[in-house]
Amino acid sequence: MTQKKLEKKVILTANLKGLSEAKFQQKTRSMARAELDEPSFVPNLTPSASDVIQIIDDLETLYEVRGTLQREMKVNTTRIRKKEEEIRNIITDQWMPQAQTAIGRDIVKAKRLGFGIKGQDKHGQSEASVNNSIPFIIRIESASLRHTLHIINNHHSGIILPEDADRIDVYEWVGDEEPPYDLKKLSYLGVAKSGKFVNHFEPEQREKHVWYIVVYVNKKTGKPCEHGDPMKAMII
């Protein structure tokens, strides 16, 4: 008696999970074009390959719009920080000396004008907050297959971690192009300790560019706060 050879059932998979946006767009467009090139393989496919290609085109446009908005947000954030620094410098370096000369030791007048009194008002740690400052990479020390990040607060150089910050998270983006603003698109490296973070590399990574972004994590919410511009260094 002849036995029939059992054939395994073919079960398809889309293989679309875990792809980067660029690879997702590339693969789905390739699949849609393949359906156009081989219409007899799956007759009367719905929705049609042409319709799906139009959706992919729409997605590409949305990617471009988002990139534009991210760049505009970055530029606007930089302008905000510059204006804050300008105002801070005026009050600290210009108004305060003039007020000191004009009102002398009159504490009441000083308080009415909004100034603090040295030795009486708290300064330093209490002034820095995740709401009014960000961590800043003051320099990247490059050695063989190693980067050491040195981090301070952008407005209070003597402070690393404000009282309302839980930690400083460090992210990286490898490549020549500047990274996206969204932290979810970056690679998480870990937590900076005492204002320093060391990143090690493999030999095959030499001469690649690495962009770093550091961000405070809010102690109360546990979420990342606003971050500043990325800093770039080459792997040597």
Image (cartoon, rainbow, N blue to C red):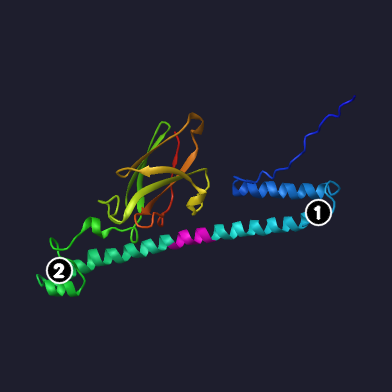
Which residue is denoted by mark 1 in the rendering?
45
The extreme left residue here reads 105
Q: Is residue 194 above or below residue 133?
A: above
Task: From the top left corner, tell me how far across and down residue 138 is, in percent.
Answer: 34, 47
Assign the magenta stretch its main secondary structure: helix
Residue nearer the viewer, 233 or 194 = 194
Residue nearer the viewer, 31 or 114 = 31
Query: What amino acid type should be assigned to the residue bearing mark 2?
Result: Gln
Range of the magenta residues? 69-76
- How far apart are the alpha carbons under marks 2 and 1? 80 Å
The extreme right residue here reads 1
Q: Is residue 180 magenta?
A: no
Query: What amino acid type should be assigned to the residue bearing mark 1?
Result: Leu
Q: Is residue 199 left or right of residue 102?
A: right
The extreme front residue here reads 1
Q: Quadrant of the C terminus?
A: top left
Task: From the top left corner, tell me how far across and down residue 227 is, in percent.
Answer: 41, 55
Q: Nearer the viewer, mark 2 or mark 1?
A: 1
Which residue is denoted by mark 2 in the rendering?
100
Within the image, what quadrant is residue 54 found in? bottom right
Residue at the (69%, 55%) spot, across then down: 56
